[in-house]
Image (cartoon, coloured by chain):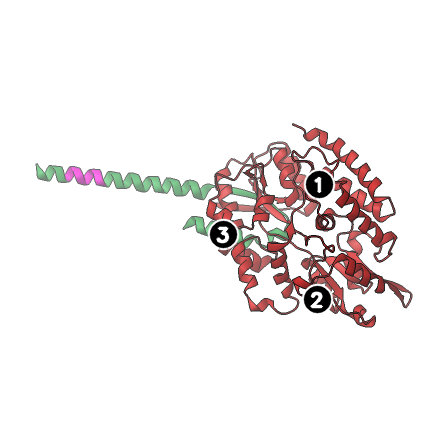
Amino acid sequence: MKKLLSILLCICLTAGLTACRKNNEDIQEAGNSVELNFLVMPDIEKVSDVFKEYEKKIQL
Amino acid sequence: MKVNVESLPFDKMFEAIEVRLGAKEDSIDILLVDAPMVANYTAKGYLADLYSYVGEKSKGNITETSLGAGTIDGKLMALPLNSSTVNLYYNKEIFKEKGIEVPPENVDERWTWEKVVDVAKKLTYEKDGRQIYGLCFEQIGRPYQLLPLAQSLGAEEFVNKDGSKTEGYTNSEEMVKACQFYYDTFNTWNISPRISADDAVSYFTGGQVAMFIGGPWQIPSMTEAGMDFGIAPHPYFEGGEVVTPTGSWYVGVSNYSKNKEEAAKFVEFITTNDDACQMNYDIGKNLPCNIHVLEAIDNDSAYESFPDNSMKLAVYESINTAKARPQMAGYAEWQSVMEKTYSDIMNGSNPKEALDLAVAEIDKQLEKYKK
């Protein structure tokens, strides 16, 4: 009986972890897939490295 | 997350905003907004309210004046990317030739406009067949640099609270006095050249102007021209308030964006995060709005020497004396009429009559913004 409960618990934990990982991947994928269009003029374009810093921060 | 940057020349960018956001397109998520246009775009429904997306700590990283210029009726419509200021520049050779002491660097000893005019009269003369002028504004005829004249005399508002009426505000007693001063520089004292704003900096760098009211962005032109110049704080009227121009580029989120929250978080980062603002300053050398970056410049001894000390002066003015241009839905119309009015005054129109005509025209144009 104990063995059966352990197996059931193990199955539940594995399923839970898999679902959680899948959920995290979905969120990350959604975050990664967002593309923002920023309308600027050339003077501001030169600071676009700052925008890349945000992309890096979001990926972490 | 990916940020696609679409870069258009100055005029084209404004056109693109009008055409695409006017048609409620979602092709723009984030846009640059000239400071006084925040109210205009808000009235047209182009901008999303950022208030709920931006944290209180982030808001606290920005100078109060800059944050205020992006706030309309309590709603945070745009955040400042950078700011600007204006100083008094002078040609050392002209001062030396006439044996006149140069303006002091110390903000507590800044010259009054009365002193500037007194000295400018002495520095207006003919040399080798060329006319030298004592004083010239960089942005001749533009409110950005001319409104502080009226503000120094006590003008507080240029339009009523709901932005629908300029009668009694844009032609206030202080505005008339300020415009009389502007008129006199061209028509009574003859200390300023009647030229366009586009030619002003070349008059200064070419040695035809002794004192120049301009922005630090012109320093590279002065240095490249090889001129011997100095920097002093912006003047004020005797007995009046010290007021300097400010305002520059803001960043807003389109009301038609499908990714408002993500866009708002991006705008929050690039405009308020200390590291991002420091990086922005390091690359662009534009006056920051982030309080911690401003403090870092103020405490850095590297900014003690000329001409980098202009940034220290800019920081001081930004924190202590800067006043923004008026916030109103009809700013574009107001500015257009005022530029023509300043031009008429330069060319000899009576200041009071010109301002009375201006407010009548502006108020007619503001009708369309009445709720």
Q: Colour of chain B?
A: red
Contact between marks 3 and 1 (CB within 8 A): the answer is: no
Q: Quadrant of residue B94?
A: bottom right
In the rendered structure, which amino acid carries the disc numbered 3? Asn
Residue B98 to residue B337: above or below: below
Q: Earlier in the sequence, mark 1 or mark 2?
A: 2
Residue that badge 1 annotates: B158
Q: Relative to residue B298, is residue A15 drawn left or right?
A: left
Provide the chain ID for the residue under circle 2: B
- Residue B46 in the image: above or below residue B150: above
Q: Which residues are magenta?
A: A7-13
Q: Earlier in the sequence, mark 3 or mark 2?
A: 2
Q: Which residue is mark 2?
A: B104
Asked if residue B194 can be seen in this view, the reply is: no
Colour chain A appears in: green
What residue sits right under mark 3 in the picture? B273
Residue B9's tag is none
Q: Give the crowd class for mark 1: few <14, some 14-19, many >=20 residues within 10 Å.
A: many
**Which residue lies at the image location 49% right of the left edge and 56% below the top edge?**
B275
Q: Quadrant of the C terminus of chain B?
A: top right
Q: Position of residue B210 (x, y in %)?
A: 79, 63
Of circles 3 and 2, the one toward us is 2
